[in-house]
């Protein structure tokens, strides 16, 4: 219930220092990997994100169960340091309002909560579901438990000229040393990386993924441009996942057991209830 | 096969003869470590779509599958509802729920196969779902019943044999053919000389069928360079059915 409410509302910026913004990477990815890792470019395996990623994943917690008192955002839900993000005034105002609504227990309905696919960045940071990476010389696939959906990154082509906007956008990748650099455009504007982003089709992300800790850890960081909402590019906090060879892939489907009654109290503002749940009025 | 492992792990000075031995044992290790026939396995990769669509699944000879009475009665009731335009019994048609196995393999939308020696992934355009098959041992899917079940596969000559069990409450077709949790689906996927992909599916479910039976679904390869789209059922349910029966005709 209330899955991904925060995806469109709040992002914890506690891990974001102001210096992190506008820098393509503020991480240790340049450090040499231990020799334990036979092939740092082989990302294949089962991965699970630690709970600390929740801030970036934008949370799955039910805010009604994790409150910290009046006027404060719930634990783990993420309190955005809105002033630290290079937001345009109107985007910042919207984010503050979204946060207020979350605290009041009446968050805005988002497309993600309405069972539409999440953005790749939100899926990577999801600390509830794991994922498997499958790799060929020309493709890297992320098979996510969440949404039972996939992210396909092609290594052998450019973005097409006739791009049709989509929830996960169009992703192409290349290697810079042992870092997989993924360039994504063509978002349909319905997903979110953080508050104030993704409400338009101008989002452009560059996600860098690399192995660390001798191959036992996957790290990633997303640099993004969103000229409609941001005054300049920014970088999301670094996320990570642990190699979990024994992890069993579970199919998580939003539509399974989802019912509009579960979303009572949420506010429909960007789209209608009927658009969110068309079967309520379909034949 | 234990001896090559022990020899391989021994640290000894390199010498010409020993280098040959080392090479031999590396090959022996690879033979054990990699799935059989992985190197020469047919390449099923590409974007595929069914060559035809039928909302009712039939046996190879065109007959109706041998449903037990209770299942036949339920199937008849669902077909009667469908005939009246009432799809409320079908979560796929009414709410865009996952089609699951085996229905996801028969719907008229393209899918991409991505193949490695250890894994096969079906990436579906419809609702952007996927199905994964372990080729290097038992399924690593969770033990619970799941819409795509738990699939493991191996190569038999030029056919990829995929066995799937633990399938959640899905339908076998778009008309609502039922099955029980005991359903076991065995697929034999092979490339035909005419470059189509054949999927011979065998169904065993003693709680639903009087006897095992088979059907064949064929797929054609969509021209190279075709990008798999994103067809989100809920985004268009207001204006088109969840499963658009002629959609397979829209591909080049």
Image (cartoon, rainbow, N blue to C red):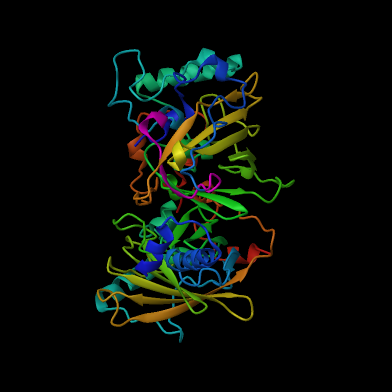
Q: Residue at x 60, y 42 (%)?
A: A169
* Res A91 → quadrant: top right
Residue nearest the viewer, comparing A83 with A40: A40
Q: Is residue B52 left or right of residue B62?
A: right
Can see residue A12? yes
Q: Residue at x 36, y 76 (%)?
A: B203
Q: Residue at x 41, y 63 (%)?
A: B7
Residue nearest the viewer, comparing B231 with A222: A222
| Residue A245 is inside the magenta segment | no
Looking at this view, name the residue that lies furthest to the bottom: B61
Can see residue B106? no
Residue nearest the viewer, comparing B72 with B213: B213
Question: x%, y% of residue A46?
Answer: 42, 48
Q: Is residue A141 left or right of residue B94?
A: right
Q: Is residue B159 above or below residue B143?
A: below
| Residue A43 is inside the magenta segment | yes
Q: Tell me the quadrant of the picture where the N terminus of chain B can be found.
A: bottom left
- Magenta-highlighted residues: A39-54
Q: Is residue A229 above or below residue A198?
A: above
Q: Is residue B146 above or below residue A153?
A: below
Looking at this view, name the residue that lies furthest to the right: A161
Q: Is residue B72 left or right of residue B202?
A: left
Q: Is residue B111 above or below residue A215?
A: below
* Res B195 → quadrant: bottom right
Residue nearest the viewer, comparing B53 with A206: A206
Q: Tell me the quadrant of the picture where the C terminus of chain B can be found.
A: bottom right
Question: x%, y% of residue A201?
Answer: 64, 34
Give the total number of marks visible in the rendering: 0
Question: x%, y% of residue A83?
Answer: 53, 12
């Amino acid at each position: 219930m209330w899955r991904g409410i925060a995806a469109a509302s709040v992002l914890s910026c506690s891990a974001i220092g102001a210096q992190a913004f506008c820098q393509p990477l503020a991480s240790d990815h340049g450090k040499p990997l231990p020799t334990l890792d036979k092939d740092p470019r082989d990302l294949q395996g089962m991965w699970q994100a630690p709970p600390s990623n929740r801030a970036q994943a934008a949370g799955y917690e039910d805010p009604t169960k994790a409150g910290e008192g009046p006027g404060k955002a719930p634990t783990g839900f993420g309190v955005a340091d809105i002033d630290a993000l290079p937001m345009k005034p109107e985007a910042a105002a919207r984010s503050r309002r979204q946060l207020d609504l979350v605290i009041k227990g009446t968050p805005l309905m988002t497309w993600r909560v309405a069972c539409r696919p999440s953005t790749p960045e939100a899926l990577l940071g999801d600390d509830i579901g794991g994922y498997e990476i499958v790799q060929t010389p020309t493709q890297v696939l992320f098979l996510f438990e969440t949404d039972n959906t996939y992210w396909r990154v092609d290594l052998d082509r450019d973005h097409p000229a006739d791009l049709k906007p989509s929830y996960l956008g169009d992703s192409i990748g290349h290697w810079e040393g042992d870092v997989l650099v993924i360039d994504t455009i063509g978002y349909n504007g319905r997903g979110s990386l953080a508050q104030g982003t993704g409400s338009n089709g101008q989002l452009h992300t560059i996600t860098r993924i690399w192995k660390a800790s001798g191959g036992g850890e996957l790290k990633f960081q997303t640099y993004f441009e969103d000229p409609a909402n941001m005054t300049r590019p920014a970088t999301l906090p670094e996320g990570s996942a642990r190699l979990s060879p024994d992890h069993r892939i579970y199919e998580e489907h939003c539509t399974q057991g989802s019912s509009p009654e579960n979303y009572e109290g949420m506010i429909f503002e960007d789209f209608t209830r009927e658009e969110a749940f068309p079967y309520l009025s379909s034949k | 096969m234990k001896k090559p492992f022990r020899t391989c792990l021994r640290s000894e000075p390199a010498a010409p003869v020993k280098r040959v031995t080392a090479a031999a044992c590396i090959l022996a290790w690879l033979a054990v470590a990699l799935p059989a026939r992985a190197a020469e396995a047919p390449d099923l990769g590409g974007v595929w779509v069914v060559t035809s669509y039928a909302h009712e699944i039939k046996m190879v000879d065109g007959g109706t599958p041998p449903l037990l009475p209770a299942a036949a009665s339920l199937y008849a009731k669902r077909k009667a509802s469908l005939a009246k335009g009432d799809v409320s019994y079908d979560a796929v048609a009414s709410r865009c729920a996952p089609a699951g196995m085996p229905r996801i393999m028969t719907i008229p939308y393209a899918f991409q196969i991505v193949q490695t020696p250890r894994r096969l992934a079906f990436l579906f355009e419809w609702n952007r779902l996927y199905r994964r098959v372990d080729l290097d041992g038992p399924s690593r899917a969770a033990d619970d019943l799941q819409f795509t079940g738990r699939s493991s596969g191996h190569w038999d000559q030029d056919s990829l044999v995929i066995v799937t069990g633990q399938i959640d409450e899905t339908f076998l077709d778009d008309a609502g053919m039922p099955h029980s949790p005991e359903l076991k689906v065995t697929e034999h996927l092979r490339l035909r000389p005419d470059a189509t992909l054949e999927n011979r599916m065998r169904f065993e479910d003693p709680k639903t069928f009087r006897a095992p039976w088979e059907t064949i679904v064929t797929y054609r390869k969509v021209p190279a360079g075709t990008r798999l789209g994103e067809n989100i059922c809920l985004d268009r349910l207001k204006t088109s059915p969840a499963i658009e029966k002629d959609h397979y005709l829209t591909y080049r």
